Image (spheres, grey):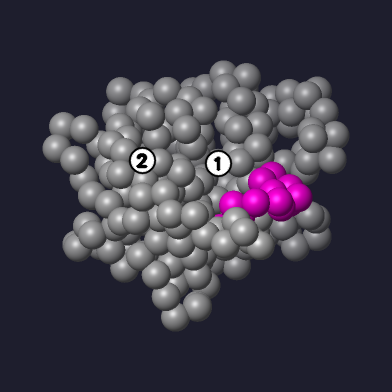
């Protein structure tokens, strides 16, 4: 996968850019570098970028604004680099569509692991469709695993990020079960939470809003001292064999 994967690193710190460029190239990635938002836009316009590593603090534009703008027109995965004390910015970054974040200072090996994890999740979009149980039906919505698309009861597409879709599928595959934040983080991202990791809470909030469940909690319930639960019936659609009720 790495040999054809193109990573864009956007950071105004020259030493960090050079370090990450050399390290990721040594791991087999193709790497482009940018030291500000303008250069990042130029690289994105002239190259097929597979994943963006984006620092929040840029000299000419907010990394959050760049993340928001990019997410509005592209599904390219984004990993944010943040200072350890910028917890609020990390949360906002997830809210505007980032797929993951990493606090500075960090070990390049950890960034490599995050990149590979995000790429594994997004690679499912290009994988061949399974012969059965390709879709889930719930509360009038349809989630299609093969294309990673969700349609609302009226048939309109619900725009979800890769991380939001993965979280939704985690619930759809386990309807009615209480899932803790730690379990959800492990299922969707394959990692353990940090002491103040709120990424699952942010993703659940975003998912509720996009499903029209914000403030209602009819689809996704919060369980006291526990976690979250998908509280509606789910159908697995098996194609020619018809739907099978699972909850």
Residue 29, image x, y percentages: 79, 33
Q: Residues within 10 Å of mark 2 (few under 14, many from 20)?
A: many
Task: Give the residue at x 66% y 46%.
Answer: 124
How far, Cα to Cα, is label 1 from label 2? Answer: 16 Å
Left/right of residue 52 with respect to residue 24 in the rendered view: left
Q: Main secondary structure of the magenta part?
A: loop
Looking at the rendered structure, the secondary structure element under dot 1 is strand
Left/right of residue 196 with respect to residue 116 in the rendered view: left
Q: Residue furthest left?
A: 224
Q: Could you tell me if residue 121 is visible in this image?
A: yes
Residue 95, image x, y percentages: 39, 53
User: Could you tell me which quadrant the N terminus lies in?
Assistant: top right
Left/right of residue 134 with respect to residue 204 in the rendered view: right
Residue 200, image x, y percentages: 36, 40
| The quarter of the displayed image where residue 116 is located | top right
| The quarter of the displayed image where residue 123 is located | top right
Left/right of residue 74 with respect to residue 217 in the rendered view: right
Task: Give the residue at x 76% y 50%.
Answer: 128
Q: Which residue is mark 2?
A: 200
Say which of 159 and 34 sits in front. 159
Q: Residue furthest front?
A: 241
Task: Give the residue at x 38% y 29%.
Answer: 183
Looking at the rendered structure, the secondary structure element under dot 2 is helix
Report the span colored magenta. Answer: 123-135
- Whether residues under marks 1 and 2 lie with C-beta atoms below 8 angstroms apart, the answer is no
Task: Give the residue at x 65% y 55%.
Answer: 146
In the picture, the disc for residue 163 is none
Judge whether residue 11 is colored magenta: no
Relative vertical location of residue 200 with respect to residue 20 in this rendering, above or below = below
Q: Which residue is mark 1?
A: 79
Residue 3, image x, y percentages: 85, 34
């Amino acid at each position: 996968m790495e040999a054809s994967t193109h990573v864009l690193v956007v950071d105004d710190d020259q030493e960090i850019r050079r370090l990450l460029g050399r390290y990721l190239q040594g791991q087999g990635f193709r790497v482009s570098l940018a030291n500000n938002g303008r250069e990042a836009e130029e690289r994105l316009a002239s190259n097929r970028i597979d994943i963006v590593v984006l620092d929040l603090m840029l000299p000419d534009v907010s990394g959050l604004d760049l993340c928001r703008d990019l997410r509005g027109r592209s599904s390219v995965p984004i990993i944010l680099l943040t200072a350890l004390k910028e917890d609020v910015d990390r949360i906002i970054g997830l809210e505007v569509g980032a797929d993951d974040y990493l606090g500075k200072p960090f070990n390049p090996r950890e960034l490599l692991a995050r990149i590979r994890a995000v790429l594994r999740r997004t690679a499912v979009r290009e994988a061949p469709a399974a012969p059965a149980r390709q879709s889930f039906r719930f509360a009038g919505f349809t989630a299609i695993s093969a294309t990673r698309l969700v349609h609302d009861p009226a048939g309109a597409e619900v725009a979800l990020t890769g991380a939001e879709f993965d979280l939704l599928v985690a619930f759809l595959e386990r309807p009615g079960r209480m899932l803790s934040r730690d379990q959800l983080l492990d299922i969707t991202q394959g990692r353990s939470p940090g002491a103040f990791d709120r990424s699952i809470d942010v993703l659940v909030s975003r998912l509720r809003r996009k499903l029209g469940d914000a403030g209602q909690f009819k689809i996704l319930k919060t369980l006291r001292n526990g976690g979250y639960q998908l509280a509606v019936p789910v159908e697995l659609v098996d194609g020619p064999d018809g739907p099978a009720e699972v909850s």
